[in-house]
Amino acid sequence: VIAPLTRLPLLRMLRTSRASFALGGWLTSAVAFAVASRWVGAPPSADRILLNAVGPIVLPLLAYALAGAALGGRSLASSTAAVVALGAQPARAALATLGVVAMACAAAGGLFSALVAVTAHGASDPPVARDAFASAYAGSLGGAAYATWFAMGATFGKRGGGRLVFLVVDWAVGASNGAGALLSPRGHVRNLFGGAPPVDLPERASAGLLVALALACALIATRRAR
Amino acid sequence: LLSLVAGTTSPRSGRVRVLDGEPTEARIRPQIGYVPLQAILPDAMRVTEVLATASAIRREPGQPPADRLRALGVEGLASRLVSSLSREEARAVALAEAATSSRVRVLLVEEPFVSMDPRAATRLRQVLQEKALGGAAVVVATASELADDHTFLRDGAVMAQATSWGATAALPPNGVRLHIFSSEARALAAALACEGGVEAVVRRDASVLVRGRDATELARAAARAIVTSGAGVTEMGFDPPAPEEARAAAAALNGEGKAP
């Protein structure tokens, strides 16, 4: 029953310009950051681009745009109202939409991160294949976490305006290394990309917390969309 | 009321039972077809994809989309994107989906002749009758003559039930009746149905008969409805009370006169 419910968010992403513009725009930006790093004074380093550009800028804004495209710019409940009117259960419809958004953001985040790791690869970086794989893993995990984070945000506000609030909250709370950074994806993504960890967490703990955060956001969003 | 039955609105108190269950239950929801005035269809899909998705959600065998749409004469919309449909076309598609679904056992339609594609409007009566004959409960909120059984509601309470609109319009006693002849009787009747102070509306060809408790309030409601609907009016006037109503009113007055 879940499979037909994934058609609507999928088609929204494929048939509207919002998703393709976001993908094209941020892909170009990510590659541009990587290429530009080769021309500036400092020696090329994939970690620097992933940490300063992909993690804090590209990944959240890409997930924000893809979530908006899959939801049709509405709240999670409104975006699923059409399939609910055809007899679907609201919670299942919300879960299907969340799944599509999370998969799309994970794929795009992983691909972009791997591409940047290869393009900006420097002499001080680990072997390129290993670096690309590790970056793809971190990007995928971060993308999926951001997708559910914004989907939960879209359950607040009449037209899902909470999505923007969640973007600002992530930006503000996740910037620090304190305990507050544990509650949003930004601090954990920074940790996975080799930056300062929130409350000195090891990378593995940040990965686990990202998964837990994604599951918690999905659960809350599904319950609120009923 | 229809949205309560459809499960899209929760009751403030009490419970709604449909098909021996709550309308929000997973086994009940696919058996309810609801066509509100503003039909909601999956925006990024083509009409054929909407029908296929609906069949999958309702877990019913797929039927050729053209056949389903042909029931209401809108098969020409099959390849269109939902986002390109007008409000009237979207309502016709939503009604075609619900009416031709083999799983839908309760079909709820809000004002079927309002904001309806003209091609569908001509076949609508037949489609709803066929659905009802097929064993489904077809509930229509309307100001037009369409149903076999009529329920008259006021403030959420059932005031009367009748088998013809004429009988419904005559209820409750001691009211006043206003008749209006209009070139746009259908639109006028729909607008009148939304007015406060109007207790019943009957439309027959170019005439609309309205029932209310207070003559002044009814005249004001009629004036507002005429302006809202933009309908041209050729004649309007209050009907004299029926003999039995006059007798009942006289008896009531006499009774009051004899009271201490």
Image (tube, rainbow, N blue to C red):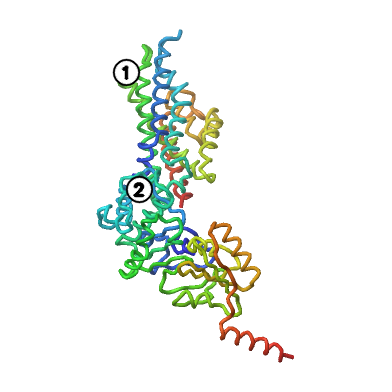
Look at 44% across and 41% down and name the residue there: A72
The alpha-carbon separation of the residues under discs 1 and 2 comes to: 39 Å
Residue farthest to the front, as pictured: B234
Q: Residues within 10 Å of mark 2 (few under 14, many from 20)?
A: many
| B138 left or right of B231 in image | left
Look at 60% across and 76% down and name the residue there: B175
Circle on res. A128: 1
Coordinates of residue A25 in the picture (x, y in percent): 42, 25
**Of B42 and B183, which appears nearest the observer?**
B183
Q: Can the viewer see residue B125? A: yes
**Of B72 and A164, which appears nearest the observer?**
B72
**Of A117 and A211, which appears nearest the observer?**
A117
| Circle 1 or circle 2, nearest the eye | 2
Circle on res. A5: 2
Q: Residues within 10 Å of mark 1 (few under 14, many from 20)?
A: some
Coordinates of residue A206 in the picture (x, y in percent): 44, 32
Coordinates of residue A100 in the picture (x, y in percent): 37, 40
- Element on which disc 1 rests: helix
- Element on which disc 2 rests: helix
Look at 54% across and 44% down and name the residue there: A157
Q: Is residue A37 above or below residue A70?
A: above
**Of A80 and A140, which appears nearest the observer?**
A80
Q: Can the viewer see residue A179? A: no
Circle on res. B253: none
Look at 38% across and 21% down and name the residue there: A116
Coordinates of residue A56 in the picture (x, y in percent): 48, 26
